[in-house]
Image: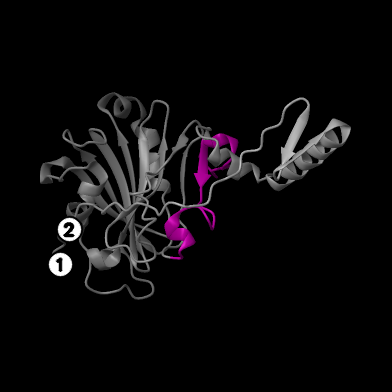
Amino acid sequence: MAVAAKPMGMSPRVAPSSSRRRRVVVATSSSARVDGVCDGGGASVARRGALLLAATATLTVPRRALAIAEKPVEVANYLEAAKGVEGFYEFVPNDRETPAIRAGTIGKYRFAMPGTWIRRTVANILSGNYCQPRCDEPWTEVLFQGPKEGSLQVIVSPLNKLSRRSLSEGESIDAVGTLDGIINALGPNITGNTIEEEEVIKAEAKQIDGVTYYWYTLDTPYAKTGQHQVASIAAKENAVFVLAVSATDKQWAQNSKKLKTIQESFRV
């Protein structure tokens, strides 16, 4: 079955501006302004203290959510240790983690990475935020980066961009396309450039827990993401999931084993 290449692209939209403006509260040593009323003396101090306590209670959030919000934070500070892989930590998105998950477009996925990696922000235009739950083009779910090993991204493509039919229950990526067809179609989303035949160093299909994964090792000197890539691609329901790990020549020479461990940990 032939699979046509389709680079990722989305037309930017501008979020509507709000006419509402947040009121700024200014407090001095002699007075406090709350809701437009100026109080003075000891009563104002007590009132300010009560308001601050209430605000602190309201803003209390789980440790994991704080860690994600306060980038950059090493994932070892808020993710659970991966089983059987020392020094690696497993990422599983929560129910509100990304626009696609909030919209119910896709299910959960997971992978492990070294504890020193940090999360990077996905640009709104790449996140699929404006097109959920029915995006016509692939979008980026999450981005992470290591201090010296490389970086990773999870990309999701709507199944209808790669196949003319929906997957039946229990079917996987081999029902969508061949090893060659899938990497030709999704390669530009991984590298930012087309994939030539000689750049695919290794391509293999793996059966894990009843799901087929396509594993690729790429040497892409013209890629925007780095010369070396490893990717794990799988299909679930009406989406194709891509975990792509990228590295420079130097990073690959020193850390290829770690990067392959990330690739092989991906599950949908």
* Residue at 36% over, 36% down: 151
Pinpoint residue 214: horizontal percent, then vertical percent. Answer: 29, 54
**Is 71 in front, or is 94?**
71
> CA–CA distance between discs 2 and 1?
8 Å
Along the viewing direction, whichever of 92 and 26 lies nearer the viewer: 26
Query: Outermost residue, right direction?
Result: 42
The numbered dot on residue 171 is: none
Q: What colour scheme has been applied to the protein in the rendered image? A: one colour
Q: Quadrant of the C terminus?
A: bottom left
Amino acid type indicated by mark 2 = Gly
Residue 159 included in the magenta stretch of the image: no
Q: Residue at x 32, y 27 (%)?
A: 251
Q: Mark 2 or mark 1: which comes first in sequence? A: 1
**Residue on which disc 2 sits:** 181
- Crowdedness near tag 2: few (<14), some (14–19) or many (≥20) residues, C-alpha within 10 Å: some
Q: What residue do we see at 32% from left, 62% from top? A: 135
Helix or strand or loop: what does disc 1 sit on?
loop
Tag 1 residue: 1
What is the quadrant of residue 2 in the picture?
Answer: bottom left
Give the magenta range.
Answer: 75-104
Indicate the quadrant where residue 206 lies: bottom left
Question: What residue appears at the point 22 percent right and 41 percent down from the top-left corner?
Answer: 218
Label 2 residue SS: helix
State left or right for residue 222 relative to residue 115: left
Q: Quadrant of the N terminus?
A: bottom left
136 and 242: which is toward the camera: 136
Instruction: Identify the amino acid type marked 1.
Output: Met
Q: Position of residue 173 (x, y in %)?
A: 29, 63
Answer with left or right where residue 39 lies relative to residue 105. right
Q: Do the residues bearing badges 2 and 1 touch, measured as CB atoms within 8 Å? A: yes
Lateral position of residue 59 relative to residue 94, left or right = right
